Amino acid sequence: MTELEQETAESPTTEAATAADRGVAGFMTGLLVGALVGAGVALLFAPARGDRIRRRLGRGARAFQERAREELEHAARRARREIARRR
């Protein structure tokens, strides 16, 4: 099988991987936008004092940052494995 035929045969897998990557990116974007909107709504409607709200938002932001870092590391590991597999 020539290289071109091999690449063509692998095309559905490549398309599926690309679609999965777009799905992860879309999810992360939605997660970020949702977190920002939620934080804004919390500021507007929270009955607690300002300093308490800021502490809560800070904890939430740190938790979100950690989760985003974990997801990014996971996606990077998957990408490296996929690149190594295709070599």
Image (tube, rainbow, N blue to C red):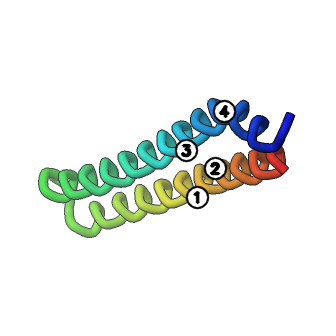
**Secondary structure of residue under mark 4:** helix
**How far separated are the C-alphas under marks 2 and 4?**
17 Å
Residue 35 position in % (x across, y down): 34, 52
From the image, which quarter does the N terminus lie in? top right
Nearer to the camera, 22 or 70: 22
Q: Amino acid at mark 1?
A: Arg
- Going from N to C along the chain, the mark reached first, 2 or 4, is 4
In this view, 47 is above or below 12: below
Q: Residues within 10 Å of mark 3 (few under 14, many from 20)?
A: some
Nearer the observer: mark 2 or 4; the answer is 4
* Residues at discs 3 and 4 in contact (Cβ within 8 Å): no
**How far separated are the C-alphas under marks 3 and 4?**
12 Å
Q: Amino acid at mark 3?
A: Asp
Write down the residue under mark 2: 75
* Residues at discs 1 and 2 in contact (Cβ within 8 Å): no
Q: Residue 13: give its label.
A: 4
Write down the residue under mark 1: 69
* Residues at discs 1 and 3 in contact (Cβ within 8 Å): no
| In-image side of 64 versus 86 (left or right) | left
**How far separated are the C-alphas under marks 1 and 3?**
16 Å
Q: Amino acid at mark 4?
A: Thr
- Going from N to C along the chain, the mark reached first, 1 or 3, is 3
| In-image side of 27 versus 75 (left or right) | left
Residue 55 position in % (x across, y down): 36, 64
* Residues at discs 2 and 3 in contact (Cβ within 8 Å): yes
- Going from N to C along the chain, the mark reached first, 4 or 1, is 4
| In-image side of 60 versus 46 (left or right) | right
Write down the residue under mark 3: 21
**How far separated are the C-alphas under marks 1 and 2?**
10 Å
**Secondary structure of residue under mark 3:** helix
